């Protein structure tokens, strides 16, 4: 599958006349709870030639391929990525952490990573992860019988919130590490790991009776972070010169 993905990335470069600076896996495979039939969520950052940027025209700053049952591939122009990085965009921060990397031929991604510790804003990320957890909880986990696999898409963002509260740094990608680090020993932890084992080994996780212990943890944690986020100060990082430097150095390095 890796070779197929790399072929698709080469096609994108040729068809769109760009260079891909960084490409990685995101989603369930990067988070460590993919099942055997999970699709591949490929994300990338790219750059156009210098002349492309010398225009007052509004231009599209994303590349998206049609999604099929196996592949979901899309990417952001470097300028877009840098503007979002300034706001501590959680998906971008996750891409930069991914341990499934398909391409990193230039120094740009590492230069951006080097700025995370000084630019990170927990408030921006807390709202993102809390809203993700609340949305999935509301949409999928309200009946007596629920889509069991949706627990992962609520638990991971809530544990990400807990990590940021305790560590003041971007949360690790791996769900298993978050559970091991943040959930106390006991029935809740055992039930979460049992679900994780079932999902990774390919057991069908369709609608089943809701798991009361996990359900209660989710409700209490959402309530807690709804209050907590109201009192978190926003970090404003205004070092545009540093981001401009990365952009200009990338143009020079690539072209």
Image (spheres, rainbow, N blue to C red):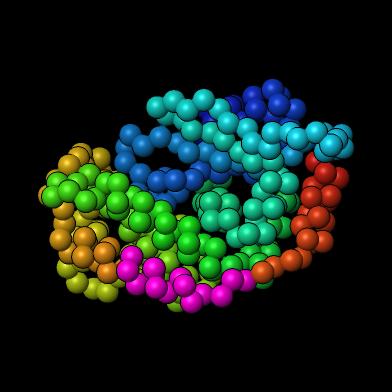
Q: Residue at x 48, y 62 (%)?
A: 127
Q: Which of 101 and 217 is in front in this view?
A: 217
Q: Which of 111 and 101 is in front in this view?
A: 111
The C terminus: image quadrant:
top right
Image spot of residue 192 (x, y percent): 24, 59
Q: Residue at x 83, y 51 (%)?
A: 249
Using the image, determine if residue 242 lies above or below residue 146. below
Q: Which residue is drawn at 27% across and 46% down?
A: 140
Left/right placement of residue 199 relative to residue 44 reads left
Using the image, determine if residue 96 lies above or below residue 186. above
Left/right placement of residue 22 relative to residue 232 reads right
Marks counted in the figure total 0
Which residues lie in the magenta part?
A: 222-235
Image spot of residue 180 (x, y percent): 33, 67
From the image, give the main secondary structure of the stretch colored magenta.
Answer: helix
Image spot of residue 5 (x, y percent): 54, 31
Left/right placement of residue 72 relative to residue 155 reads right
Image spot of residue 37 (x, y percent): 33, 34
Left/right placement of residue 180 relative to residue 101 reads left
Tell me if residue 117 can be seen. no
Tell me if residue 143 can be seen. yes
Using the image, determine if residue 183 lies above or below residue 132. below
Magenta span includes 136: no
Magenta span includes 225: yes
Q: Residue at x 21, y 61 (%)?
A: 214
Q: Nearer the viewer, residue 201 or 210?
A: 210
Examine the image and state in which quarter residue 211 appears.
bottom left
């Amino acid at each position: 599958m890796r070779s197929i993905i790399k072929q698709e990335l080469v096609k994108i470069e040729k068809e769109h006349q760009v260079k891909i600076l960084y490409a990685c896996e995101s989603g369930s495979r990067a988070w460590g709870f993919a099942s055997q039939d999970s699709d591949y969520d490929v994300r990338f950052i790219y750059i156009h030639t210098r002349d492309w940027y010398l225009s007052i025209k509004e231009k599209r700053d994303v590349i998206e391929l049609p999604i099929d049952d196996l592949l979901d591939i899309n990417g952001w122009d470097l300028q877009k990525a840098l503007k979002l990085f300034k706001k501590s965009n959680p998906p971008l921060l996750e891409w930069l952490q991914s341990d499934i990397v398909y391409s990193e031929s230039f120094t740009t991604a590492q230069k951006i990573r080097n700025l995370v510790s000084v630019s990170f804003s927990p408030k921006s990320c807390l709202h993102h992860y809390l809203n993700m957890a609340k949305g999935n909880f509301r949409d999928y986990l309200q009946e007596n019988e629920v889509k069991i696999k949706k627990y992962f898409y609520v638990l991971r963002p809530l544990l990400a919130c807990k990590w940021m509260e305790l560590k003041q740094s971007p949360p690790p990608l791996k769900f298993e590490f978050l559970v091991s680090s943040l959930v106390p020993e006991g029935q809740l932890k055992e039930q979460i790991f049992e679900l994780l084992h079932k999902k990774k080994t390919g057991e069908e996780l369709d609608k089943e009776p809701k798991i009361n212990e996990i359900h209660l943890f989710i409700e209490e944690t959402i309530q807690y972070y709804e209050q907590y986020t109201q009192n978190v100060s926003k970090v404003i990082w205004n070092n545009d010169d540093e981001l401009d430097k990365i952009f200009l150095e990338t143009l020079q390095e690539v072209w």
